[in-house]
């Protein structure tokens, strides 16, 4: 009797895992991993659009509330999906939107969201300006203990998510901007640890670094973004909610600077 029960449980677990992995492939083909656009268009005649991409364990509406007064008349929150995340698929979705509408776009990113901006530099989108907050452009910007931890731990978390199958996309992790799934978290960690976007910054006009950034190496960020205006503020990594006034002051300095 128990042999049959155990056999059924194992069979269901295998079906759960395999069907989820196959559907992940399908989601990539249908842009389910590219984030969910939440657009507000205040002026249909305008050819401008701001895109906001948050960092790890956040969503753009909460992460960028600090600079709401600086938004253009048209803007887009690029929300992360609990199905998971692909930085390059997000690039394709944003670039398609820009090209289709001939937008002059500003791209605002925080931390791991900067992977999207690095790809956009090479995607053929001409009229864009990028503003990066605490940019985690690739694993070299990470402090060494964290870098090693993610290189070893991110694949293990990914394997755990595959073994959990459909359970891994249930939003159970509380964050400032809303609940995350384990799969979304795993995809972000895999991106930080292993994704190597082009090391390009020609269209990046402004960067905010935090003096007390406990995760990133500001000296590497300065090397990557040597041609951009860099503002340093007295804050910890990506704390745009708790230290919003400091990030706002830094962003206003970047936006007011001649480009």
Image (cartoon, grey):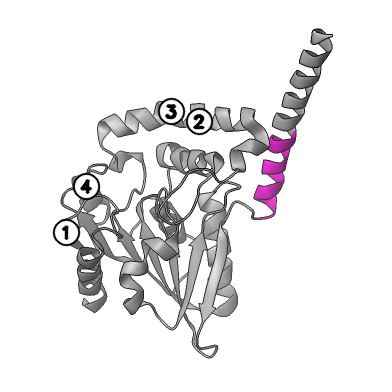
Tell me the tag on residue 232: 1
Q: Considering the numbered disc 1 on the image, is that residue within a helix, a strand or a loop? A: strand
Asked if the stretch drawn in magenta spans residue 135, the answer is no
Question: For the point 48% across and 67% down, which residue is it?
Answer: 77
Q: Which residue is mark 3?
A: 153
Residue 213's mark?
A: 4
- Report whether 140 appears left or right of 53: left
Residue 173 vs 96, above or below: the answer is above
Marks 4,3: beta carbons within 8 A = no
Residue that lies at the very extreme toward the bottom in this rendered image? 45
Could you say whether the residue bearing mark 2 is in a helix, strand or loop?
helix
Residue identified by numbered label 2: 157
Q: Percent position (x, y) of residue 69?
A: 33, 78
Q: CA distance from mark 3 to mark 2?
A: 6 Å
Instruction: Give the spatial CA distance, label 1 vs label 2.
Output: 33 Å
Crowdedness near tag 4: few (<14), some (14–19) or many (≥20) residues, C-alpha within 10 Å? some
How far is the residue under mark 3 from the one under mark 1?
31 Å
Within 10 Å of disc 1 (Cα), the crowding (few <14, some 14-19, many 20+) is some
């Amino acid at each position: 009797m128990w042999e049959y029960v155990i056999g059924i449980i194992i069979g269901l677990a295998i079906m759960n895992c395999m069907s989820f992995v196959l559907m992940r492939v399908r989601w990539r083909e249908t842009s389910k991993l590219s984030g969910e656009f939440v657009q507000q268009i205040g002026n249909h005649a305008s050819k401008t659009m701001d895109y906001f991409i948050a960092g790890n364990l956040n969503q753009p509406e909460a992460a960028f509330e600090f600079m709401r007064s600086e938004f253009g008349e048209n803007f887009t929150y690029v929300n992360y999906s609990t199905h998971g995340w692909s930085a390059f698929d997000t690039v394709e979705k944003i670039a398609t939107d820009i090209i289709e509408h001939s937008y002059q776009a500003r791209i605002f990113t925080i931390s791991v969201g900067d992977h999207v901006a690095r790809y956009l530099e090479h995607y053929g989108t001409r009229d864009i300006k990028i503003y990066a907050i605490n940019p985690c452009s690739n694993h070299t910007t990470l402090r060494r203990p964290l870098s090693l931890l993610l290189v070893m731990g991110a694949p293990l978390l990914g394997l755990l998510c595959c073994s959990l199958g459909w359970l891994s996309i249930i939003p159970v992790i509380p964050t400032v901007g809303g609940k995350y799934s384990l799969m979304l978290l795993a995809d972000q960690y895999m991106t930080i640890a292993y994704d190597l976007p082009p090391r390009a910054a020609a269209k990046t006009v402004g960067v905010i670094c935090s003096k007390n950034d406990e995760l990133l190496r500001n000296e590497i960020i300065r090397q990557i973004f040597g041609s951009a205006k860099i503002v340093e503020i007295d804050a910890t990594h990506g704390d745009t909610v708790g230290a919003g006034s400091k990030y706002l002051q830094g962003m206003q300095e970047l936006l007011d600077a001649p480009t």
